[in-house]
Amino acid sequence: MYTEFGKALRHIRLDNFENMKDMAQKLNVSSSFLSAVEVGKKNIPAKWCEEISKLYHLDKTASVALQNAYDITEQRISLNLKNMDSNQQEISLMFARSIKNVDPHTLEKLKKLLEDEKSK
């Protein structure tokens, strides 16, 4: 069964009329390794999101979707706090630690708020 990342890779391949062997060659791996990554038997190389985005000239939306699929498959997300002020860092950490306890209604409000900020 494909992981979310595997589904995203398959979608990219099909959109580019490629088979697994073609994509594996572009990524300098074997077809069997690529297949194992797609079904979750091997870890996804960290550089693949960026590399695949460049190789397949993905637009921002497709690149974000690929990164989201990576994060969902890996069941973790990395947050770079380096260029944030102390308030942004504190809120980011609070959010990450408490998100699983937030009710669905509040989550929808947060999502809308963040989408509105993103579109500014």
Image: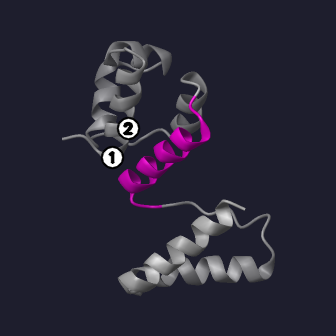
What is the quadrant of residue 115 in the picture?
bottom right
The percent position of residue 29, horizontal first and vertical second, equals 42, 21
Dot 1 crowding, Cα within 10 Å, few <14, some 14–19, many 20+: many
Q: Vertically, is 36 above or below 14?
A: below
- The answer to which of 70 and 111 lies nearer the viewer is 111
Asked if the magenta segment contains residue 75, the reply would be yes
- Separation of marks 2 and 1 at Cα, in angstroms: 6 Å
Asked if the residue under mark 1 is in contact with the one under mark 2, i.e. CB atoms within 8 Å, the reply is: yes
Q: Vertically, is 120 above or below 11?
A: below
The percent position of residue 5, horizontal first and vertical second, equals 37, 42
Determine which residue is flagged by label 2.
Answer: 8
SS type, badge 1: helix
Q: Main secondary structure of the magenta part?
A: helix
| Residue at image coords 48%, 46% | 65
Dot 2 crowding, Cα within 10 Å, few <14, some 14–19, many 20+: many
- The answer to which of 44 and 102 lies nearer the viewer is 102
Determine which residue is flagged by label 1.
Answer: 4
Does residue 43 appear left or right of residue 47 in this picture?
A: left
Does residue 54 appear left or right of residue 109 in this picture?
A: right
SS type, badge 2: helix
| Residue at image coords 40%, 54% | 74
The percent position of residue 9, horizontal first and vertical second, equals 38, 32
| Residue at image coords 40%, 19% | 24
| Residue at image coords 59%, 35% | 59
Q: Quadrant of the C terminus?
A: bottom right
Does residue 21 appear left or right of residue 77 in this picture?
A: left
Magenta segment range? Answer: 58-76
| Residue kind at label 1, given as amino acid type | Glu
| Residue kind at label 2, given as amino acid type | Ala
- The answer to which of 116 and 97 lies nearer the viewer is 116
